[in-house]
Each structure stands twice: as C-alpha cells, then as structure tokens.
Amino acid sequence: MSEERSYDAVVVGAGPNGLAAAIELARAGKSVAVYEAASTPGGGCRSAELTLPGFVHDVCSAIHPLAMASPFFKSVPLADLGVRFRQPEAPLAHPLDDGDAAVLERSVTETAKGFGADAKAYTRLVEPLVHNTDKLIEDILGPLRIPHHPIALARFGLSAIRSAYGLARARFEEPRARALFAGIAAHSMLSLRRPPTAAYGLMLGVVGHAYGWPTIEGGAQKLTDALVTHLTGLGGQIFTDRHIETLGELPRSSAVLFDLTPKQIVAIAGDVLPARYKRRLDRYEYGPGVFKIDFALSEPIPWKADVCRRAGTVHLGGSLEEVTAAEDAVCGGNLADRPYALLAQQTTFDETRAPEGKHTAWAYCHVPSGSSFDMSERIVAQIERFAPGFRDTVIARHTMTAPEIEAYNANYIGGDISGGVQHFGQLFTRPAIRFDPYSTPNKQLYICSSSSPPGGGVHGMCGLYAARSALRRVF
Amino acid sequence: MTTDDESRTTPEVEIIADEATSAEVIEEIKTARDAANWAQLTGALTVGEVPAEARNINVTGRRQTGPMQGFGKMWQKTYRVSLGTEVTPHEVISEWKGKFPDFWPEGNRFYGPLTGIAPGDVALLNLTMPGRLKLSTGVLVLYADEESFTFMTPEGHMFAAFITFSAFEDKHGDTSAQAQVLLRANDPLFEIGLAVGGHRQEDKFWVHTLDALASHFGVTAEVDTQVVCVDKKRQWQNARNIRYNSAIRSGFYMMGTPFRAMRRSGR
C-alpha cells in the first residue's frame, strides 16, 4: 500500500482500540493511517495455529462478551464483514471439589436455581442490573462523567463499590454462588479483598446474562480482519512491520493517537510532552502478568461435572477463599501453588477451529509482573483436579510466560494484558488525572489504548472516545 | 506460595501426543475428516519411483522433521505474489503442483513421483550449493488439497521445516500465490550457514520461484517477502542432528565419485 506524505490523523498501534479510533476518524471524513509494529494487525485480538496445523488458537483474547455489548462494535456492520458470534449453551461454569459446578446460565432464573439457599439473593442482586445492561454499559464503558442513567448506575454502584470478597460473603451463604462470583471478579487481576473488584464480578456476570460470553467463529482474528476491511473501505490505510520509535518516523498529521501504554508513549513522544505530565506517565502503575497455555486435544475435556461441558468458559480455582488466596499471592508478588486459571473450550461450540473430532483449549493464570516461571504444570494440575484424565487428551501445547507475552505485544508490560492496573486510582483517570483522559497537554497527541478509560477488554471504546476527543479538539 | 525460581525466556510448543496419548488417538488423527489430504506418517521415509539420475543418499530411512525437532532459531518466512484476477486459486495450485520443478532456479532439481504431488509422496531434491556442492535431500508431502500443499523435511535436510504453498483470493478479489516456510536450521552447521548467507540464498530461491510462477501466468509483479523470527532460542538438545547433515554426507559422496567410477569401470 502506498504511503501518503500527510494525513489528518495517524494512529500508532493496530489493536482493537487503534483500529476503532481510526474507523471513527475515517467515518468523520478524516484521512487516517495506522502504523503497526507487528507483521499483522490485531494486537490482543489475533488467532494462529500455535500448536498443530488445523488447530486455531486465540493468541490473546478469546471470549468476547464486551465485543457484543460495546456501543462501538454495535456501530460496525460486523455480520456483513463476516463476523459470527458463537454462543456456548452456558457462558460460564465454575467446578468445585464436590464434583459439581456452579453455572452462569443465560437466564438469571436458571442460574439462581443452582444456588440453593442463595437463589433469591442472587436474583435480587443481578436481575435489576440485567434489565439495565445497556444503560450501565453506556455509563461504565467510558470516561468518568455525568451519568446518562444515574439511577441505574447508582443501583449498580452501591454493590459494585465493594470488594468482591466482601460482597460475596455478605450476599451469599453457600460456597457455590460465592465461588462463581469470585471467579468472575478475578478477571480484574486485583486482590479480591480490594474495592471495587465487585464491579468486575457484577459487570461481567450481567453481560453474561444479557449478551452471553461468545467466541468468534474461526478465531478472534476474524474480528480484527473485519475491522481492517471496514477501515480500508472507509479509506484508511494500515502499514504493518513499522515499529515507531520517534515521532519523526511518522508522516505529517494534525493528530497522533497512540494505541500504546504510557511507557511507550514517553519513549516516543517524551520530548514534546511537559515534564509534569511525563512524570505522571512515568508513575503509571502496571498490574500482574499472565502465563498462557494453549492445548490441542484429542477429545473434549473430561470434566467430572457434566455441566462444564456446556460452558464456553470454565474458571478453575475452587472456593471463594481459594481464589482470593491465589490472587492475593499474585498481587503480593508471589506465584500461587494452586493458581486461579481461566479456561476457554471454544471448539465445543465452534467446530471450525480444529480438525473434526479434535478440540482446543485456551487457558491462562495470573503471575507477578514479568515472571518467567513456567506455570504449565500448575495449570494442568488445576484442570486435572476437575477433569481427571485431561492429560491423556493433550496432543500438543503452546506456552507463553509473561515476558514472552510482552515480547509478542509490547503493550503487555510485564505480561499485563489490561494495559495497566485497574484499581480505583487508575480506573477512570488512566493514564493521568485529566478532564479528558484521552488528551495530553500536547494538543496533537492522544491516547487511545486500554491505558485510558474504560481499560482492558476487546470493546474498542478507548479508541472511540480518543478519536472523538481528537475530532473535538483538533478538527 | 513459591518464588520465581524456574524460568525460561522463549515461547514453547510441545508435541506430546506420543507420550501422553494412546496409539488409538494417533490413529484417529490419521483418519480425521480430511484424512485423504494428509500423509500417513509411517516413521521412516521411503522413496517411490524417481528418475535414475536422482541421487538418494539422505532420504530413505530418515524420519520427517518439523521445526520442533530442529536446532536453530525458528523463522517464519512468507513470500507472496499477486497474480491478478484472471486466474483462480484452484488453477494456480493445480499448475504449481503439476509443474513444480519448472519454477525452481536453474541448477536445482526436484524429482517427484510421476503421479505429481500427493499426500505421503516423498520427493528427492538435488540442490546446487556454494562451492558447487550438489546437496542431496528430499521432502515429504505432508498435506495437499486444491488450494494448498505442505512439505515436511527429512532428518539431515538444511531445515527442520514445514513449507506450505497456497493460493487464495485477497480482499480485493486478486488471486495471490504464497510460499510460507516455518523453519529451524537442523543442526549447528546449517545454523552457521544460514547466518553467513543462507538466509539470503533461501529468500532468493523462493522469490525466484514465485517470480517464475507469476511469469507462467503472464503476470509481472513484485514478490512480497516477510521474515519473522518466531523463537530466538536455539535447541541445543538437538545439536546432535548434525550426524545426519546432508551437506556433509553429500560432500563425502561427491569425493567418492571418482572411486565409484573406477570401481564400475573395473567390473
């Protein structure tokens, strides 16, 4: 693709947020070019045959509830661009040592039925939020601002502001509901004793009821391919294998949007940012890393609890207390002996990803930032705990430690897949406290990565808001 | 809790079917949906009917190897050329399979079975190397369908590699032909060779091949080359692969040519 000398805007980084920003700018009639360091666009949304030919694995993100729920993705004609969301029968299962499992079903009522004495408490907590999912998403998936739906948000906030550990113990009496909630909240990569981890448990659970936890037919790469097609159809250009180290390497433009973390932004544009803002970016806090493992399997995972076979995602960590202890260990800089592991079994509901009769599994656990420890055996042990005989189904496996994940995608500092820790201090004010967090003191530079609100996840909302900020301030 | 005391620095792929699953599972893989497109892996390679001048000193009895069994850094090299809209991917692959040797650079010979390129076939390669060395090696056709085919290399080949040839329609409706090589040098000697010009030779080889393919379809287009180092780690446990090094063995074979000729004339 030929390179023009100047554009209205240039985006550095072709992850979902970078592409979202470029699409929003192109929709506004601006000429836009995206520069990507890797050979293919996609950032955290790519697929590859990591183990054996014919077995498609998602390299980073795998389950995409937020892609379905996100206002940005709703604005892109994904179906016309070949994206098919595949829904498992149940979004999530959380097996326990008694041989059974807690299950998040699409229906709140059906889910509650599995919680025995906690059925009413679960329904009371979740049902009103499920009815207001879209209102909540509109207010939560964005920067801090005057809410559009203050009542719905307040109702959510009263519970969400607590720690997941505190809310689970206060609302539920039995281990089943407590464990399920802990497993969902642990997506936050924070200690579950820390507020507002309950917000993650509630939000992801509510989205699971309202939209499901789907995967993308054929692999996450299909979503990226769709965004690329859409962007180029709007006149945008994408240049791959272009690792940008200085602003001077970019063509002339009125605005530069970085789908990068503060660390890289300082390295590239530190010279044109005020010292005070630069110091804030330098102080930006990154979270724990992840260790990831992909399996090619000869057959489906032999779960002890049959209900787990119906779920797209399975959380492996045992009780609330055990999941909390595992995440506490990681946040304290240690490795968990029995880690909380997230597992997706996409081929049970998307048969296109493996040869007929064969399966894949995708799993990761949290580790201290930058840890190069190989957690394979500990993750396998956790799977075996709830699915004895799993080892015998493994044909091949591919593993990535936290530093390898960072080497694969420079935005994953120390293996942190969320673009920075997502605690109160950085949730809405990332990467620095500003009225418009997507802007910088330099009117030409903007941040559109998950290091801006609303943070990690494949939702494209950081890109959307950053593009709108640039359109407002520059054009 | 434990501390970070066991570490490593590069991603790992581990093929553990042989250890962890029964022979039944391997059998299932062989008879999967697209079994007809896959080679039946028998362990040792055997060469079918090939012309008499083809030299087979490094193939028969060797096992096939993928990048997991190699020694050097792992590279993914992709060579792609756009062939326009006049030809379909099926036509490209059909022609490529049927006339595979014709597209190679001069001095390099591909002796495939007369049946063409089919899963399980073993072809002999006689390649011209620097110093006029005629290197004798081969490839196994691991997979073949109407839009792609994949080679796997034998022990002793320069690379432990998967080489996939494919054709597809891009988003603009143009048909592209692509050769993609996922490789590790098979042993330390070949790794040194790659570093001192081997990579350049390899790139030239495939660029020439795709150029020739494009010319065959009446197209003049630039071949796009992408090279990615997938794994910087060398697999020292596989350094002993050197015992099968096809260059060394081909060199000895060439040195013995006069003696073999004398022996024949003395009969």
Image: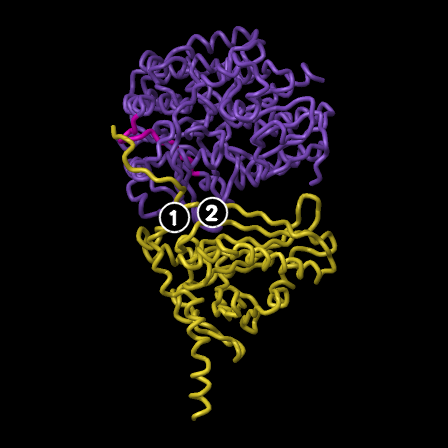
Chain colours: A purple, B yellow
Tell me if A9 is positioned left or right of A407 in this view: right
Between the residue at mark 1 and the residue at mark 2, the CA separation in whole angstroms equals 10 Å
Image quarter for residue A340? top left
Image quarter for residue B191? bottom left
Query: Which quarter of the figure is the C terminus of chain A placed in?
Result: top right
Tell me if A165 is positioned left or right of A240 in this view: left
Q: Which of the two labelled residues, at mark 1 and mark 2, occupies the earlier sequence position?
A: 2
Question: Relative to the observer, which residue lies in front, B265 or A337?
Answer: B265
The reply to whether callout 1 and callout 2 are in contact (CB within 8 Å) is yes
Q: Chain of mark 1?
A: A
Mark 2 residue element: loop
Q: Chain of mark 2?
A: A
The answer to whether any part of residue A108 appears in the image is no
Query: Which quarter of the figure is the N terminus of chain A placed in?
Result: top right
The dot on residue A55 is 2
The dominant secondary structure in magenta is loop
> In the rendered structure, which segment of residues is drawn in magenta?
A334-345
Q: Residues within 10 Å of mark 1 (few under 14, many from 20)?
A: many
Q: Amino acid at mark 2?
A: Phe
Q: Residues within 10 Å of mark 2 (few under 14, many from 20)?
A: many
The dot on residue A396 is 1
